[in-house]
Amino acid sequence: MIGTGLGHFIPLIAYLGFWILCIVSLAGRPVLGLYYMMPFLPYRLLRDHFLDYPLGANMLTILVLSVIVGAIIHGKRLPKSKLYLIWLLFGIYLYFSMWIGVALSNAPAPLWLSDVNFVTWKDYMVIPLVFVATGLVVEDRKAIRTIIIITAISLLFIDRSCILESLSRTWTTFDEDKRGGGPLAYGSNQTAAFLAQFALFFWGFAQFVKKNKIKLLSYGLVVITLFATMYTFSRGGYLAVLVSVFILGLIKDRKLLLILGLFLLTWQTVVPVPVRERVSMTENANGQLEASAQERVDLWQNAESTFIHSPIVGTGFATFQLGEHVDNLKDTHNWYIKVLVETGILGLILALVLLQQLLAMSYHLFRGATDPLYQGLGLGLFLATCSCIVANFFGDRWTYLEITGLLWVLASAAIRATHFMESEPIATLSDTSTANAINPYMAYH
């Protein structure tokens, strides 16, 4: 539509598409609603155009609920998985945690959209709703394959936006002021976390692709995404990639360990100058921490003193943003510390169990499946989760739908794949028994 003048109508067309797919989902094809919403999950800048239209700010939530309601009306059920139960317990605990914040006079009562803590909780809970919606509507191998394809297309659009934004600036040296917000609309560090996750997902997925053309496309997508990650200038993103590649080398492709070792020895001669400058900025010429690193240390010290006053249940979910901190920052720059401070030891246990179950499920699929599609899905999801775990040491990369929405779509698809995988031997045994009943000769052999 470039040059035709029709580009102005794209947001309106996309907005109307949400309403149409809500009706389609309720009418009996909820899987189409899921497919439609997927590219919009990370692309916050595109969704922001909906703000000009009625209920535009809530279109994604409305479509997710329509998919869930449509699926339930037409008799679809969730597969068995501990992850659904853990998310339910975690969501309920976080809501009651906000009331702990009220009791401690740290936050207003979480009752309506005018209350910032309630809005934070509501936005966070869209992630498990997407997870549930996917689990309800994915019912066959074709749907899983389609989800992976849509994820790849969505990632390619994000890559394109990031690279075009980077190329619009001159990067002879690193300049913090030139870092953009990215298509996720939350800043370069958050964008880097997303890119690192899905670069590793498709790197792992490509290990099991049989067709050379598809394998080449998968690795091409990985290269493009890593290039986009490099120009986010996020040290947390870089570390997430390196750690995840190391894990991939350990569990699947040992050659990567040698390549990674060579890269670590030669990276200063390989990467562009502004990237080297960014990585080397942890300390200044006097050996002192540079500003952003010092801010993190100060925040963590402040968080430690806060945690001591309420270690078991914390200060209340979404309360840290309401307090006064170093340089008026509203985040601890470490998700684990944030969970510990706001929801206490109990909240951190639930969060860690959620991560452990996600890792265990994806690794089980990777090791136990015989279908290359399921093996690639399992390994890719395992690596993406590892990348997410590392990135969250540098800030909250977990509660943003834009960063982890597609991750949970893939997680729900992986749960379905696990059930398909486990049902295959049963189906085979059933077929054999039927054949024996028909053929008396086989019954004796």
Image: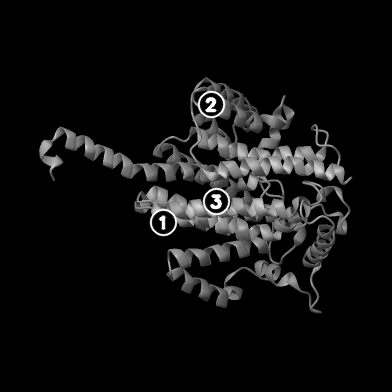
Residue 389's spot in the image, x, y percent? 62, 58
Q: Which image quadrant: the C terminus?
A: top left
Q: Residue under label 1, please give it.
A: 367
| Residue at disc 3, secondary structure | helix
Callout 1 touching callout 2 (CB < 8 Å): no
Question: In this rendering, does residue 217 appear at all?
Answer: no
Residue 25's spot in the image, x, y percent? 54, 25
Between residue 365 and residue 37, name the one nearer to us: 365
Residue 113's spot in the image, x, y percent? 79, 33
Callout 3 touching callout 1 (CB < 8 Å): no
- Sooner in the amino-acid sequence: mark 3 or mark 1: 3
Distance of mark 3 from mark 1, alpha carbons? 14 Å
Callout 3 touching callout 2 (CB < 8 Å): no
- Sooner in the amino-acid sequence: mark 3 or mark 2: 2
| Residue at disc 1, secondary structure | helix
- Sooner in the amino-acid sequence: mark 1 or mark 2: 2
Crowd around label 1: few <14 · some 14–19 · many ≥20 (10 Å): few
What residue type is disc 1 on?
Arg
Distance of mark 1 from mark 2, alpha carbons? 32 Å
Question: Is residue 118 found left or right of 143 in the rendered image?
Answer: right
Q: Residue under label 2, please give it.
A: 72
In the figure, residue 426 lies in which quadrant?
A: top left
Q: Which residue is at a point 71% across and 43% down the rendered structure image? A: 93
Residue 239's spot in the image, x, y percent? 62, 65
Q: Residue under label 3, please give it.
A: 358
